[in-house]
Amino acid sequence: MRFEAGKTYKVYDKGTVTVVKRSAHYVTLSGLVDGRFMVNQGKLYRENEYVILPANTRGFKWFCIADDFCD
């Protein structure tokens, strides 16, 4: 699956982010974490796109996966 502009996705059990803008390799997010992030894809999440987001805790990262969207 791919990230789509206008859709809201879950970030762990921490909250949600909404894709404001989408380009070929980046998404701009708003919500729990705001900013522009590189989109990754690979076997890590069954060929789904994902982004790695900074967490509030130093050295810890959150993942947001494209197939984990909110209805």
Image (tube, helix red, strand yellow):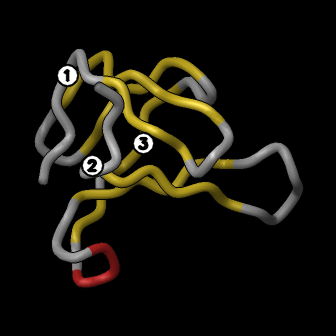
Q: Earlier in the sequence, mark 2 or mark 3?
A: 3
Locate residue 71 relative to residue 34 in the image: left or right: left
Q: Residue type at mark 1?
A: Ala
Height in image: 44 above or below 35?
Answer: below
Q: Nearer the viewer, mark 2 or mark 1?
A: 2
Badge 2 density bin: few <14, some 14–19, many ≥20, Cα 10 Å: many
Badge 3 density bin: few <14, some 14–19, many ≥20, Cα 10 Å: some
Percent from the top left, x then y, of residue 19?
32, 24
Tell whether label 1 touches label 2 (CB within 8 Å): no
* Numbered tag placed on residue 66 in the rendering: 2
Q: Earlier in the sequence, mark 2 or mark 1?
A: 1
Q: How many marks?
A: 3
> Picture quarter containing residue 33?
top right
* Numbered tag placed on residue 5 in the rendering: 1
Q: Residue type at mark 3?
A: Phe
Badge 1 density bin: few <14, some 14–19, many ≥20, Cα 10 Å: some
> Picture quarter containing residue 71?
top left
Question: Distance of mark 2 from mark 3, alpha carbons?
Answer: 13 Å
Percent from the top left, x then y, of residue 41?
23, 67
Height in image: 7 above or below 63?
Answer: above
Q: Secondary structure at mark 1?
A: loop
Question: Distance of mark 2 from mark 1, alpha carbons?
Answer: 11 Å
Residue annotated with mark 3: 37
In the rendered image, the residue lying farthest to the right is 58
